[in-house]
């Protein structure tokens, strides 16, 4: 079985390869996972029961999402919230509808059901925030573009999971759903998940205010993300306990953890603003004080400044610790992906025509919708202007990763076209990761000077 030292070694190796060979760590992790399982099959992760392992994979998501949310600047996110909504919610829904329109061409001869088609498209439209952050960390980019892409990648996951779990999966197992029924369920799920996230966000904020110890602070952050995710995913336990029923209704853990970390960041931002105001007041009092000698004033000022610096250092250390945990979780996911690729290699060859069509379809649909949103944004004074070189980036950041891997593990084995769905999702992850990432890196390098100029303009404006 995979051991903790091996996971750490592979994670560090992927970062070294990313630094010196200029390709994102996700590509190296996927390749290393494949080679690892090829030459050392005794390390197989499949020794675990498939259903149990699916739940284990799902449990990695909150750490990955927490790390991604903590990268986002709240002020920038609020500034571009409408644009992000268009990119991450409206575009995903429209992508599925456009995908359905050409499904006869993509799945020609495979007699796919509606639920199967929707699920496959959703898994192939779910973008990977970890891979996006990995690539963006290699370049200097304008903050607005980074916020759009990172925000879209995050919120896209919540939209994708809601459609996959509450629409596609029920249709796949034969449940009868109506548009109104799904809409009501989706609204209830999102609202309930946001409420759960808010409750644990306030609890987490209270805990963060109790002690300034870094370990306590890290534990509080993890508690917010993991518990909000767990409560949302296991919400049916509370329903059954209270009403003595046998419900299986659950909320979206992804929406809950994203909202909880966002709210905590907002609350901490408000507290930070208050702290700065108090520091300014103290500075003025010290400067105007006649009771303090000049050295005493200096000592008080230094102590106030030191406290502010320590708090910021602790916050940065906590973010880095969560990012390290996310790197470990992502490493396990991609090792698992490497094994999936090895085990399903023959299936992927068998359905290679469908895989290639799906990659082309998702890329063209995404490019078209990003273009439509760019056109709308450029006509509106309330939305951020999206020039052509931003449109290229928005189009090619649509590669898959962690969530798509998890979704591939949720496909019921009794599904009629189980092999097709599995092969297409895995093939799409591989091709989109390699093709999109390489194109994106080449293009950003070509336009590097322009992106740097825009980033410098952002700094000057701030």
Image (spheres, rainbow, N blue to C red):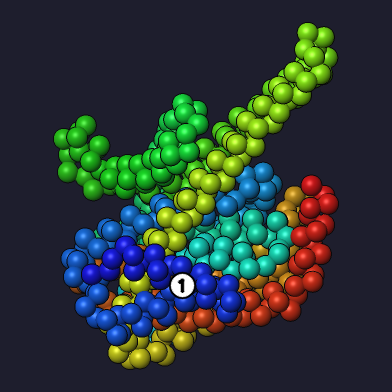
Q: Is residue 188 above or below residue 346?
A: above
Q: Looking at the image, which residue sits at the far front? A: 295
**Front-most of residues 421 and 276:** 276
* Identity of the residue drawn at 24% across and 81% down: 41
In percent of width and height, residue 259 lies at 49, 43
From the image, tell me which residue sits under label 1. 13
For residue 429, what is the image quadrant?
bottom left
Q: Residue at x 83, y 52 (%)?
A: 460
Q: Would you identify the image quadrant in which residue 52 lies?
A: bottom left
| Res. 121 visible in picture | no
Q: Residue furthest top?
A: 291
322 lies above or below 313? below
Q: Is residue 298 above or below residue 159?
A: above
Q: Quadrant of residue 59?
A: bottom left
Left or right: 128, with 413 as reference point:
right
Where is residue 148 shown, x and y percent of the image?
64, 58
SS type, badge 1: helix
Q: In x, y percent, where is residue 455?
A: 76, 60
Q: Residues within 10 Å of mark 1 (few under 14, many from 20)?
A: some
At a point 52% along the width and 38% down the height, the residue shown is 263
Whether residue 321 sits left or right of residue 139 in the image: it is left
Q: Quadrant of the N terminus?
A: bottom left
Residues 72 and 88: in front is: 72
Q: Nearer the viewer, residue 441 or 408?
A: 441
Residue at figure coordinates x 37%, y 45% from the top left: 226
């Amino acid at each position: 079985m995979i051991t903790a030292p091996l996971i750490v070694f592979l994670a560090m190796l992927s970062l070294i390869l990313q630094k010196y060979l200029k390709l994102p760590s996700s590509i190296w992790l996927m390749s290393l996972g494949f080679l690892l399982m090829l030459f050392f099959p005794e390390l197989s992760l499949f020794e675990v029961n498939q259903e149990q392992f699916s739940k284990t994979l799902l449990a990695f998501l909150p750490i990955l999402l927490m790390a991604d949310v903590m990268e986002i600047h709240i002020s920038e996110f609020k500034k571009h919230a409408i644009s992000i909504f268009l990119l991450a919610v409206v575009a995903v829904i429209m992508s599925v509808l456009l995908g359905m329109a050409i499904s006869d061409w993509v799945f020609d001869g495979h007699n796919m059901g509606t639920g199967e088609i929707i699920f496959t498209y959703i898994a192939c439209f779910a973008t990977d925030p970890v891979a996006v952050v990995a690539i963006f960390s290699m370049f200097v980019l304008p903050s607005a573009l980074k916020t759009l892409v990172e925000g879209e990648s995050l919120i896209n996951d919540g939209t994708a999971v809601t459609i996959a779990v509450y629409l596609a999966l029920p249709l796949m197992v034969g449940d009868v759903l109506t548009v109104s029924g799904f809409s009501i369920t989706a609204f209830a799920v999102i609202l309930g998940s946001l409420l759960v996230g808010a409750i644990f966000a306030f609890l987490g904020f209270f805990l963060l205010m109790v002690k300034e110890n870094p370990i306590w602070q890290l534990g509080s952050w993890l508690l917010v993300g993991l518990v909000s995710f767990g409560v949302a995913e296991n919400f049916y336990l509370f329903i059954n306990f209270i009403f003595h029923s046998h419900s299986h209704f659950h909320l979206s853990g992804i929406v809950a953890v994203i909202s909880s970390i966002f709210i905590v960041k907002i609350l901490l931002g408000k507290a930070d603003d208050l702290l700065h105001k108090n520091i300014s007041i103290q500075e003025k009092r010290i400067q105007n004080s006649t009771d303090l000698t000049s050295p005493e004033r200096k000592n008080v000022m230094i102590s106030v400044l030191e406290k502010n610096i320590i708090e910021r250092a602790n916050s940065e250390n906590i973010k880095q610790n969560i990012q390290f945990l996310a790197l470990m979780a992502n490493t396990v996911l991609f090792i698992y992906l490497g094994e999936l690729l090895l085990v399903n290699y023959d299936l992927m060859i068998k359905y290679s025509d469908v895989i290639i069509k799906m990659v082309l379809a998702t890329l063209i649909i995404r490019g078209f919708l990003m273009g439509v949103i760019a056109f709308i944004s450029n006509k509106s004074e309330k939305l951020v202007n999206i020039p052509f070189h931003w449109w290229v980036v928005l189009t090619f950041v649509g590669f898959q990763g962690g969530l798509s891997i998890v979704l591939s593990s949720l496909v019921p084995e009794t599904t009629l076209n189980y092999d097709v769905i599995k092969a297409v999702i895995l093939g799409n992850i591989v091709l989109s990761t390699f093709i999109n990432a390489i194109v994106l890196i080449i293009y950003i390098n070509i336009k590097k000077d322009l992106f740097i100029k825009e980033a410098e303009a952002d700094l000057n404006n701030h």
